[in-house]
């Protein structure tokens, strides 16, 4: 992957990477140097590898747990520094949530189905660890993550209701 990323960065820089080609790959990227690359890395070794080529990491926390997220942010910052990177990593956090009456039941039903690929025993054990089931908790977490320095928050709804977007917008402003 590191070799492929290095090659793509050369392409995005306008280098001709194909021997005998008459011109560079087109069109040129909108962003100078190409798009931002984020690694889905949650374990320390994966974060350390990502520090060699990624612009940042995306994390997913079941609870979510602020302590867990802070730990991954600290790990990423240290890995970027150890890799000799001047700029700190971009950090994107994500978690599941449900809103309104029946939020716990909604979380349970959705996650038992979604996580079933892990097997019914493990999925049933993991489902209760997801705890964001109110507007107040969602707001509290968003504010806390912003204060911790999370660059972006991706919310994973457990509802297919398109009005969920408006509900979240009302909560987060």
Image (spheres, rainbow, N blue to C red):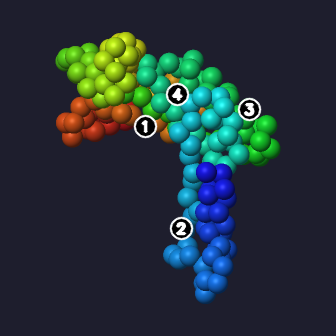
**Distance between mark 1 and mark 3 Cα atoms:** 23 Å
Tell me which corner region of the image, top left, top right, bottom left or bottom right, holds residue 125.
Answer: top left
Residue 147 position within the rendered picture, expressed as x and y whole percent measured from the top left: 57, 28
Which callout, 1 or 3, points to the residue nearer the camera? Answer: 3
Tell me which corner region of the image, top left, top right, bottom left or bottom right, holds residue 139.
Answer: top left
How many other residues sit within 10 Å of disc 4, few (<14), some (14-19) or many (≥20)?
some
**Distance between mark 1 and mark 2 Cα atoms:** 24 Å
- For marks 1 and 3, the one nearer the N-term is 3
**Distance between mark 4 and mark 1 Cα atoms:** 11 Å
Find disc 1 in the rendering and name its residue.
154
How many other residues sit within 10 Å of disc 1, few (<14), some (14-19) or many (≥20)?
some
Q: Is residue 99 left or right of residue 149?
A: left
**Distance between mark 3 and mark 2 Cα atoms:** 30 Å
**Label 2's element?**
loop
**Label 1's element?**
strand
Give me the residue at 53% from left, 67% from top.
30
Q: Is residue 131 above or below residue 116?
A: above
Find disc 3 in the rendering and name its residue.
78
Which callout, 4 or 1, points to the residue nearer the camera? Answer: 1
Find disc 4 in the rendering and name its residue.
145
Q: Is residue 16 left or right of residue 68?
A: right
Q: Which label is found at residue 30?
A: 2
Q: Is residue 142 above or below residue 12?
A: above
Work out whether residue 101 or residue 110 is closer to the camera in this orientation and state it: 110
């Amino acid at each position: 992957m590191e070799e492929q990323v290095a090659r793509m960065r050369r392409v995005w820089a306008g280098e001709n990477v194909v021997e005998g080609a008459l011109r560079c790959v087109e069109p040129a990227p909108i962003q100078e140097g190409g798009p931002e690359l984020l690694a889905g890395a949650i374990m320390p070794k994966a974060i350390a590898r990502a520090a060699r080529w990624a612009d940042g990491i995306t994390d997913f926390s079941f609870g979510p747990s602020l302590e867990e997220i802070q730990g991954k942010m600290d790990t990423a910052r240290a890995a970027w520094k150890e890799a000799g990177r001047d700029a700190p990593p971009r950090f994107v956090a994500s978690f599941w949530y449900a809103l309104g009456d029946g939020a716990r039941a909604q979380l349970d039903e959705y996650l038992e189905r979604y996580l079933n690929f892990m097997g019914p025993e493990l999925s049933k054990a993991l489902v209760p660890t997801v705890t964001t089931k109110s507007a107040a908790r969602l707001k509290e977490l968003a504010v806390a993550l912003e204060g911790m320095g999370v660059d972006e928050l991706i919310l994973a709804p457990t509802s297919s209701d398109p009005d969920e977007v408006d509900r979240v917008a009302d909560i987060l402003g």
